[in-house]
């Protein structure tokens, strides 16, 4: 066999393997991670310039495939704000894959499983009662590195902790607030669901009567929300959001962003799970996903959220950085 024919055969063989792997993997997979607590996420596989790419919750990950073996490195941010990574290794078996993981910073281990996602959705509404006080029990994968546009990358590169509105007792907005470890109370009516957040004393109204969005309504931290039922899943669509951040890494949210939440209750009625999807083409090449889980806590009491911005401003004054901060505020307002 000639060298050229041999090279062509090798290329064809590699192409067939890649095509077969893509056909096996392409689409969305529901990810469940057990690493201290359960964390949920979505893995998406797709083809890009002849390569199979993987994304977790909308952010790219390092991927290695070898027949039915898979390895991924996924970054995340823990509750203390540290930027960390986990290495996933496992085996693909039809419509499922599973394996073990290692946290690169401390060698702690866990397990994971992913199953091909069923995208079929019910059309008939079957409302359920989700009223009560709910306390967060876990967040999602909290992927940090996302698929930025050049606009978002510039914001991330220029971000300073001084830009975090929460430090100034200003609401960090819907996406971040939904993941904070404070309780919320849901009051469900026929035409409106009201959510009272302990954090920042936010009040959110979800209109269930298919009303039109009022004209000239200003943007706000929690936006304007309309809801409906798909089977027993509560779907909430939110727009008119003020510019804000996904988390303390400075990933921006524009005022053109839309958020879709899908909230389901466990069969025993004791847990809620939400998939929050941020659609913001100005800042991200693909939607960003965040999972939240809450436990019903009727014994809990909604407390007063006491936030005092004085220590923040006083600290800046003592450090001689108050002018720097005010200049950043003006700069961000003019962008």
Image (tube, rainbow, N blue to C red):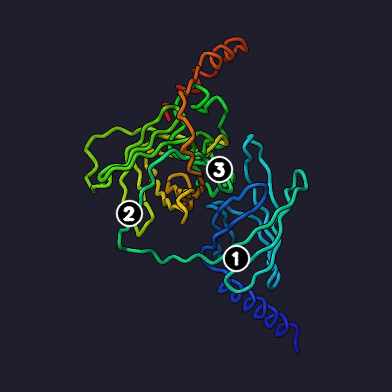
Q: Earlier in the sequence, mark 3 or mark 2?
A: 2
| Outermost residue to the front | 299
Q: Residue furthest bottom?
A: 1
Mark earlier in primary sequence (2, 1) = 1
Label 3 or label 1, whichever lies nearer to me, is 3
Give me the residue at 30% from left, 45% from top.
226
Find disc 3 in the rendering and name its residue.
Answer: 137
For the C terminus, give its image quadrant.
top left
Residue 227 in percent (x, y) is at 32, 48
Is 199 placed above or below 96 here?
above
Which residue: 38% across, 64% down?
Answer: 121
Examine the rendered structure and indicate whether residue 27 appears above or below residue 88.
below
Residues at circles 3 and 1 in contact by the CB criterion of under 8 Å = no
The residue carrying pointer 1 sits among few (fewer than 14), some (14 to 19) or many (20 or more) residues within 10 Å by Cα, namely some
Question: In x, y percent, where is residue 304?
Answer: 45, 23
Q: Nearer the viewer, mark 2 or mark 1?
A: 2
SS class, disc 3: strand
Answer whether labels 3 and 2 touch (C-beta < 8 Å). no
| Other-residue count near label 2 (Cα within 10 Å), few / some / many at <14 / 14–19 / ≥20 | some
Question: Does 120 sit above or below residue 15?
Answer: above
Determine which quarter of the picture holds residue 161.
Answer: top right
Q: Which mark is residue 121?
A: none
Proximity of marks 2 and 1: CB atoms separated by less than 8 Å:
no
- Quadrant showing the N terminus: bottom right
Q: Which residue is mark 1?
A: 52
C-alpha span from label 3 to label 2: 24 Å
Q: Which residue is mark 2?
A: 127
Outermost residue, top side? 318
Is residue 318 visible to the viewer in this orientation of the structure? yes
How far apart are labels 3 and 1 at the CA level? 34 Å
Q: Secondary structure at mark 2?
A: loop
Of the pair 103 and 83, the residue shown nearer to us = 103
């Amino acid at each position: 066999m000639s060298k050229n024919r041999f090279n062509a055969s090798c290329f064809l063989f590699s192409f067939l393997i890649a095509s077969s792997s893509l056909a096996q993997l392409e689409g969305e997979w529901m990810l469940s991670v057990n690493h201290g607590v359960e964390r949920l996420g979505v893995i998406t596989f797709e083809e890009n310039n002849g390569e199979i790419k993987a994304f977790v919750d909308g952010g790219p990950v390092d991927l290695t495939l070898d027949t039915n073996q898979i390895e991924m490195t996924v970054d995340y941010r823990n509750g203390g704000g540290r930027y960390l990574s986990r290495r996933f290794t496992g085996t693909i078996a039809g419509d499922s894959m599973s394996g073990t993981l290692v946290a690169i910073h401390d060698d702690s281990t866990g397990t994971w499983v992913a199953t091909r996602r069923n995208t079929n959705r019910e059309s008939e509404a079957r409302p359920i009662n989700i009223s009560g006080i709910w306390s967060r029990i876990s967040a999602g994968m909290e992927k940090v590195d996302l698929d930025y546009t050049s606009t978002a990358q510039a914001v991330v590169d220029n971000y300073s902790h001084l830009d975090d509105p929460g430090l100034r007792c200003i609401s960090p907005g819907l996406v971040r607030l939904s993941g904070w470890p404070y309780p919320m109370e849901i009051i469900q009516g026929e035409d409106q669901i009201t959510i009272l957040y302990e954090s920042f004393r936010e009040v959110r109204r979800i209109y269930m009567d298919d009303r039109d969005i009022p004209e000239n309504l200003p943007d706000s931290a929690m936006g304007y929300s309309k809801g409906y039922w798909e089977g027993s899943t509560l779907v909430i669509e939110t727009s008119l959001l003020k510019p804000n951040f996904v988390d303390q890494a400075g990933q921006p949210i524009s005022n053109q962003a839309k958020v879709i939440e899908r909230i389901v209750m466990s069969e025993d009625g004791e847990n809620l799970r939400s998939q929050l999807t941020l659609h913001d083409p100005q800042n991200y090449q693909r939607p960003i996903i965040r999972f939240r889980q809450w436990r019903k806590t009727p014994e809990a009491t909604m407390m007063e959220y006491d936030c005092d911005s004085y220590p923040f401003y006083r600290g800046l004054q003592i450090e001689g950085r108050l002018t720097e901060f005010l200049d950043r505020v003006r700069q961000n307002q003019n962008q």
